[in-house]
Image: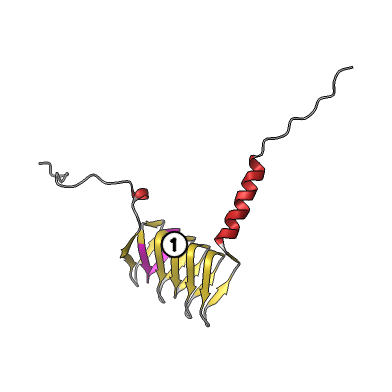
Amino acid sequence: MSLFRNENTTPTMNKAAEPVNTGKINSIMEGTSIEGEIRSDSNVRIDGRVKGTINVRGRLIVGQTGVVEGDVTCQSSDIEGTVLGKITCQDLLSLKATAKLQGDINTKKLAIEPGAVFTGNCSMGGGVVKEMDAARLRTEAKPAEPTATPAAR
């Protein structure tokens, strides 16, 4: 048996094909700072500071002490702390009373508690956006009509 390979381990599957593991939470604790890109197939909770892009296939929770500087993409999110950047949320974005969000929102559903501070633009209703994008693509994909050339006399 090799020192670097576990013979009893099954081969790793393609991460994109795996379902989101909603039972596990990755946690960035208060006092921790991360700079760079975070990608996760499960839930993420941030109570520290993150500067960079975040892509979460599950739920993103930014705790009261959490600070995010950068763009966020997630399935759903509860914001209690501070976010400076664009948020794209596939389902529900919830801004709790202690939330401070400066940036644009693109989400299907939005809940804002009294006391939350939001500065930016909001685009809601993913179905409408998808229909508009589909119509635009159909228009762009239309083949150009042949131009008539005058017949030689």
Q: In this view, does 23 lie to the left or right of 141?
A: left
Q: What element carries label 1?
A: strand
In which quadrant of the rendered image does the C terminus lie?
top right
Residue at the bottom extreme of this rendering: 114
Please tell me which residue is depicted at 86% across the width and 18% down the height of the picture.
152
| Residue located at (49% from left, 69% from top) | 93
Which percent across, then down, holds residue 112?
A: 52, 76
Q: Residue furthest left?
A: 1
Location of the N terminus by quadrant is top left
Q: Which colour scheme is used?
A: secondary structure
Mark 1 = which residue? 75
Left/right of residue 29 with respect to residue 104 in the rendered view: left
Say if 130 sits above or below 78 in the image. above
Q: Nearer the viewer, residue 14 or 147?
A: 147
Question: Is residue 135 shown in magenta?
Answer: no
Q: In this view, does 130 lie to the left or right of 19?
A: right
Q: Which residue is drawn at 80% across and 28% down?
A: 148
Q: How many marks?
A: 1
Magenta region, main secondary structure: strand
| Residue plotted at (44% across, 62% down) | 75
Start and end of the magenta stretch?
43-55
Q: Which residue lies furthest to the top in this view?
A: 153
Q: Which of 101 and 75 is in front in this view?
A: 75
Residue 114 % position (x, y):
53, 82
Image location (x, y in percent) of residue 80: 44, 75
Per the image, is 47 magenta?
yes
**Of the pair 14 and 37, the residue shown nearer to us:** 14
Residue 110 vs residue 53, the one in the foreground:
110
Q: Is 116 drawn above or below residue 40 in the view shown?
A: below
Residues packed near mark 1 inside 10 Å, few (<14), some (14 to 19) or many (20 plus): many
Picture coordinates of residue 77 (x, y %)? 44, 68
Amino acid under disc 1: Gln
